[in-house]
Amino acid sequence: MYCLYSFIQIISFLLFLIISPTRRSHFASIGKRMGFFQIPKLIKPIWIHAVSVGEVLSVKRLIERIRQEFPNTPIVLSTITLTGQQVVHSPPYQTDALVFFPFDLQYAVNRVLSQVDPKMVVIAETEIWPHFLRACKRRKIPVLWVNGRISDKSYPRYLWIRSLLKKIVSSYTVIGMQSELDCQRVLSLGADPKKVFAIGNLKYDISSSNRPLPEALVKELSLSAPLWIAASTMPLEEKMVLDTFSKLIVKHPNLMLLIAPRHPDRFDEVASLIKKSGYPYARRSQLAKPHGPSQVILLDSLGELAPTFEFARVVFVGGSLVPHGGHNILEPAFFSKPILFGPHMENFSDMAKRFLQAEAAIEVLSSDDLAAAIDTILSDASLADKLGKNARKLMDENQGATERTVSLIRKELKSQGFPPEKQI
């Protein structure tokens, strides 16, 4: 199995090298993902891996708790994407080093493991890297899979290769899944029942962002006009959002719209789309310059979306009207905002189901549905208040995954012979 996998990985790596010159963020990380980087000499750190922006945000509170629980143990954080790395700096996370996760090639994996030399690896969500897990097992480095989930879309595919996955999932020392359903799924793939725990979802444990928004943006968002935020939008959704906006302003002429595309490399594309729509607009990156009144704001920045929710009257969470699996709905819930999402919430199916059952969100099936739902919320303050309060209540009731994860880490370190540390 490993020979075939190695061959596939080498071919994938060569293809990556071919396309990477056209993607600056990919090209810039190649050497680092092969292990060519320098980090401070750290003594047996805990290595936490979070693939990209969403995962990085979900482990922020976990990193803070690990720092409190194990103050003498360094923390290394890795990501795969450049955007994930950028989020770590705004505001800075309590880590001692930030690295790129290696390509799953034996040379790269061994080089990076030798550089970092961790006492433990903690992998967030669904990251399955056979060579990395095998190398950790050989070096007797415990690997914890936390905040684990297996989506409705992925599960049938995993069942097809269950015989191959059994050896891989058995390489994890501890598996902490988000729900009982996720536990059942990973057990069906061959995980050891003694290693599998339902710990909840780390994303529920978010706290308010302490990153201050720039004064120019706050000034725009603080106007008395109601604000609709279209968050983490994907291709095709921006056109739906703008079409919906054109219907809404007939009845709500003062309505403002903030669009936050999911991927930074689409900022210019979305700006062109907004410009063609004819609405007066401004880009967040240019708000400090003199400009006229804006009806639409393009949030072309990183790490600033979460604090903007405080100013919203209603929030649509993107990646859900088109088949991209949806995005995290908890950040607007933190601010008690009415939340809307489309039918494609496969990556957050359990969360979406809970919010709908608790009357803490509304599912829309089309741009017409979206327009009708926003119109209703803007016209009915009591409904908006009810949706927002239910969302925050549900979020509060489902917190605790961070503490359960820290407990698993503490227990595993103790079993590995590492003494307890004086907490701060």
Image (tube, helix red, strand yellow):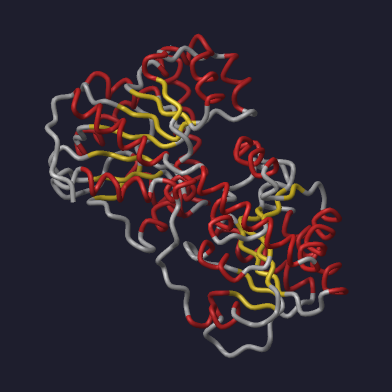
Q: Nearer the viewer, residue 398 or 159?
A: 398
Split into 4 quadrants, where in the image is the N terminus? Answer: top left
Q: Is residue 202 left or right of residue 116?
A: right
Q: Nearer the viewer, residue 81 or 383?
A: 383
**Which quarter of the picture shows residue 382?**
bottom right
Residue 391, given in percent of the width and then of the height, sits at: 61, 52
Mark yes or no: residue 31 visible.
no
Taking the spot 68% from the left edge, 86% from the top edge, the residue there is: 293
**Which quarter of the picture shows residue 118?**
top left
Circle count:
0
Q: Nearer the viewer, residue 125 or 358?
A: 358
**Which quarter of the picture shows residue 253?**
bottom right
- Residue furthest out toward the top: 163
Residue 5 position (above or below residue 291) = above
Q: Is residue 226 left or right of residue 305?
A: right
Residue 142 position (above or below residue 72) = above
Residue 14, given in percent of the width and then of the height, sits at: 46, 34
Mark yes or no: residue 133 visible.
yes
Residue 172 position (above or below residue 243) = above
Q: Nearer the viewer, residue 305 or 195?
A: 195
Residue 403, given in percent of the width and then of the height, sits at: 35, 40
Taking the spot 57% from the left edge, 47% from the top edge, the residue there is: 394
Q: Is residue 356 left or right of residue 408?
A: right
